[in-house]
Image (cartoon, rainbow, N blue to C red):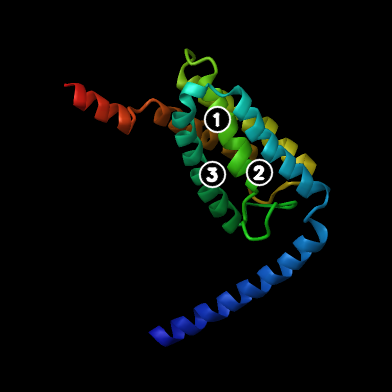
Amino acid sequence: MDKMEKIAQVREYFEEFHQLHESYGRLWLDETFLHFDWWGGTLLGLGAWIFWLFYRKKESTHRLLYAGVTVMLLSLCLDYIGAALGLWYYSGKESPSFPAWLPFNFCMLPVCIMFLIQTKPHIATWKKGLFFGALTAYVGEPLFVWAGYYVLTGWKYTYSLPIYALIYIFAEWLTKRETFSDAIVHKKHK
């Protein structure tokens, strides 16, 4: 296949993708936007951040947000890969343009992790990671399947446990790194 044939083939796939996206967008607008499942996801997302605003350790806000944003990016990438591989999909999404369920990736997952990081800091990170992984895989995911937000097509809850545990462990590890401003302050005082 030469360069021009490749470009033509990619154009065909793009046009198919664009047509599918337009069809899905019309379905989303008619059957999801401002319907019960859309409002439910919106309230879950906003509720998570409101909870965090009131119950975060204010002196740790920046470190926790650093971990939270990292969790958002990781979960969004992993969610995209899983949806692209046909392992799951979402109904009741907040936006027709994202394959991921935004209230989970941008709100509930990072807020839960940030809250757990600041809670009982004396417990070993790996124990909290396993707890978080099990709770999310065996309670959170089944609840979202039951509610109709999350549809599994080739994925098992058990596969999620180590992924969630590792995301938590990585996020907590990030919060324990020396910040750039701390490093600069230490250098100035030497």
Q: Identify the residue at the far left of this view.
A: 190
* Kind of residue at badge 1: Ile
* Kind of residue at badge 2: Pro
User: Within 10 Å of the Cα at label 2, are there few (<14), some (14-19), or many (20+) other Cα atoms?
Assistant: many
Mark 2 or 3 closer to N-term? 3
Spatial distance from mark 1 to mark 3, Cα to Cα?
12 Å
Which residue is the site of mark 2?
103
Relative horizontal placement of residue 36, taking residue 90 as reference (left or right): right
Q: Secondary structure at mark 2?
A: helix
Contact between labelled residues 3 and 2, with CB atoms less than 8 Å apart: no
Q: Identify the residue at the far top of this view.
A: 122
Residue at (34%, 30%) from the top-left corner? 179
Q: Identify the residue at the far front of this view.
A: 188
* Kind of residue at badge 3: Ser
User: Within 10 Å of the Cα at label 3, are there few (<14), some (14-19), or many (20+) other Cα atoms?
Assistant: many
Which residue is the site of mark 3?
75
Which residue is the site of mark 1?
113
Spatial distance from mark 2 to mark 3, Cα to Cα?
12 Å
